[in-house]
Amino acid sequence: MRGEAAAPALVLTPCELEHPLRLSVLAAECGVMQVPENPRQPDGRQIALHVARVPAISRRKRPDPLFVLAGGPGAAASAFYASVAGAFARILRERDIVLVDQRGTGGSNALECPESEELSGRQSDAEIQARTRACLALLAPRADVAFYTTSLAVRDLEQVRAALGYERINLYGSSYGTRVAQHYLRHFPARTRSVILDGVVPVSLPMGPSAAIDAEGALERILRRCAQDSACRERFGDPASDYHAVRAALRVSTVPISVRDPATGDDRSFEFGADHLASVLRLLSYTSEYAALLPLVLHAAASQEDYAPLAAQYLMVERAYAQTIAAGMHNSVVCAEDVPLFAAYAVDRARIASTYLGARQLDGLVSVCRVWPRGEVDEDLHAPLTSAVPALLLSGSDDPVTPPAFAHEAASSFTHHLEVVLEGFGHGQLTAPCVDRVMTQFVARGSVEALDVSCVSAARPLAFFTSLNGPAP
């Protein structure tokens, strides 16, 4: 465990957390904790960490809260929680929930880069690097982007824990947040009571090299699930054929699109191409709710040359992703912690080239990181982890980002663990049926022994849409 320094002052006052789409507001207590951007210069520039606590409902609450860690990298914990608060309602009955916007996200000096309005598809290496330099120039007056890594984030978490006076905490991490949770556990094991890892990133693996292959595998499973469903098969036949037909058509030429933006209502015109298809396929594969639309929109394009449904979904999911992720913080993490490991990773370029994503995402990250400053990381960030802290590992069988094999690899770090895989679900199981009960039971016990997860076997993903009206009756 690192030496424990005196915690900075942190005063919480009543506040509200707003849903990212302004659908609801939640009562909370919020405050700001000042921490040095560069720990080696304690009197230098400070970061105002945004901290929120949602107090437990019970007057006899348990002393160990749940800290919620968001994914990305680049998502803010407060916004993430506000969008999924119902999934934590059972835990909230007896435990405080604490949200720390990780440095570089949300209210903690967010490293946001300007959104591009370009809809032309693939960018050249020179264009990517020019945009990256523009973002760095915009951030330079208020941030040294090298100091926004996981290694520093876990120190921030520990200071918040100490400032709030908790002896031990429970951790829930989603996607990249699972890396943060494991690294906090590595350095502060005596302060960690239990961990829930949802969409698991193993400490040994860099994010990126297997992304295209994992995404292709998830799409294949989604389309196979449609072919095995009587209503979906009757409506669309073999959805994999539609998928391959659309890919083949867009390899030859782009399709002129004029569509109403589903978010703004504005008319948008652009050339829809293979790169737009790749983006929409990947992001629609994230959740079973979005995946339920895939056979429908692919069939419209393949059988009627109607690409408007695909284009509309592209506009919606791309904007939602961009508004959720602080791109600069994402770059700071990936360029320091992942891309430097690519050279030692066995990348199957031929297999990657056969996927709908191809190598564009992988090569794009490398291009960004040629320009983005590389921050320091703890030497043990990717070292094997061994822990006796109880761990619940959640995966979806159709996850395009962190497949169940990732959780299985991470599970070897824990002497007391349980892996749970939800069939037909995608990335992040937090809102899947009955998962809230499993998590509540696990945190209450602080143990995986005799944990009842039988309800998971009855969970079913949303049925496939056979028309714009929804699934078949």
Image (cartoon, helix red, strand yellow):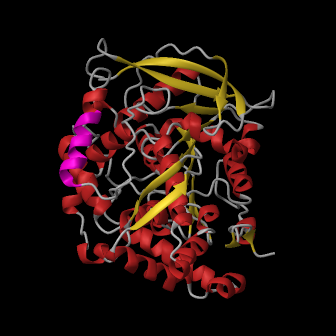
The residue lying at 46 percent from left, 69 percent from top is 405
**Where is residue 33 drawn, in percent x and y?**
48, 18
Work out whether residue 267 or residue 91 is closer to the camera in this orientation and state it: 267
Q: Which residues are magenta?
A: 124-135
The N terminus, quarter of image: top left
The quadrant holding residue 303 is: bottom right
Q: Is residue 251 magenta?
A: no
Work out which quarter of the rendered image holds the C terminus and state it. Answer: bottom right
| In the rendered image, the vertical position of residue 54 relative to residue 283, given as above or below | above
Query: x, y (%) of residue 103?
Result: 42, 30
Q: Main secondary structure of the magenta part?
A: helix
Q: Is residue 165 above or below residue 458?
A: above
Q: Is residue 129 above or below residue 430?
A: above
Is residue 127 rendered to the left or right of residue 423? left
At horizontal 39% and vertical 78% (from top left) the residue drawn is: 249
Front-most of residues 216 and 439: 216
Q: Position of residue 456 (x, y in %)?
A: 70, 66
> What residue do we see at 40% from left, 32% from top?
104
Residue 128 lies in the magenta stretch: yes
Estimate the x, y position of residue 70 in percent, counting from the top left.
Answer: 52, 43
Q: Is residue 12 above or below residue 215?
A: above
Is residue 113 shown to the viewer in this render? yes
